[in-house]
Image (spheres, rainbow, N blue to C red):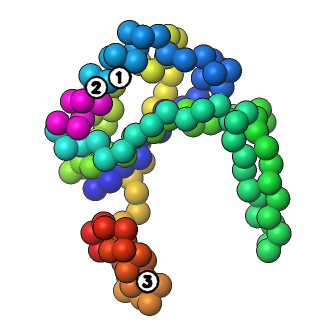
Amino acid sequence: MRFMVIVKATKDSEAGVRPSEARFEAMARYNEELIKAGVMLDGAGLKPTSQGARIRFEGDTRTVIDGPFTESKELIAGYWIFEAKSKEEAIEWARRCPNPYDGDGEIEIRPFYELEDFGESAAINHHRANERALGGEA
């Protein structure tokens, strides 16, 4: 099962405050452990929302909204994609993570939908073909 492990943003991360060298090193060691165990499929930190944009959909209309997104209560500062046998295993790996911040922080763990979660249909078969084209399982 694949899981997205979401690092929630803080005021400091939104202000562009970067982790200390010691925190970077601790995170590098953690990532190395995840990679060696075959758990980490991907992961990265995200720049502040002031450098991002959103697309708002209203019917067929698209509106671009430039960051920062100060009205949002929960923002994302980074992520990992884990491969784990269960939610419990993903939680155990996430519990080993060094605190990404000097103070309080939060990580959210959510499973991905897999194509097997849906019934057979032409649309699902189209998604399977897309996964194969990307070199993934289908």
The residue wearing badge 1 is 27
| Residue numbers of the magenta segment | 30-36
Callout 3 crowding tier (Cα within 10 Å): few <14, some 14–19, many ≥20 = few
Q: CA distance from mark 2 to mark 3?
A: 37 Å
Question: What amino acid is found at the position of numbered circle 1 in the picture?
Answer: Met
Q: Crowding near pointer 1: few (<14 within 10 Å), some, many (20+)?
A: some
What is the CA distance from the residue labelled 1 to the residue labelled 2? 5 Å
The residue where tag 2 is placed is 30
Q: Which residue is mark 3?
A: 126
Q: Secondary structure at mark 1?
A: helix
Q: Is residue 16 visible?
A: yes
Magenta region, mostly helix, strand or loop? Answer: helix
Mark 2 touches mark 3? (CB < 8 Å) = no
- Please state the horizontal and vertical placement of residue 7, each as a whole percent of the image: 49, 33
Marks 1 and 2 close (CB-CB < 8 Å): yes
136 above or below 70? Answer: below
Question: Going 41% across and 46% down the picture, which residue do you hit?
Answer: 4
Q: Which quadrant of the figure contains the N terminus?
A: bottom left
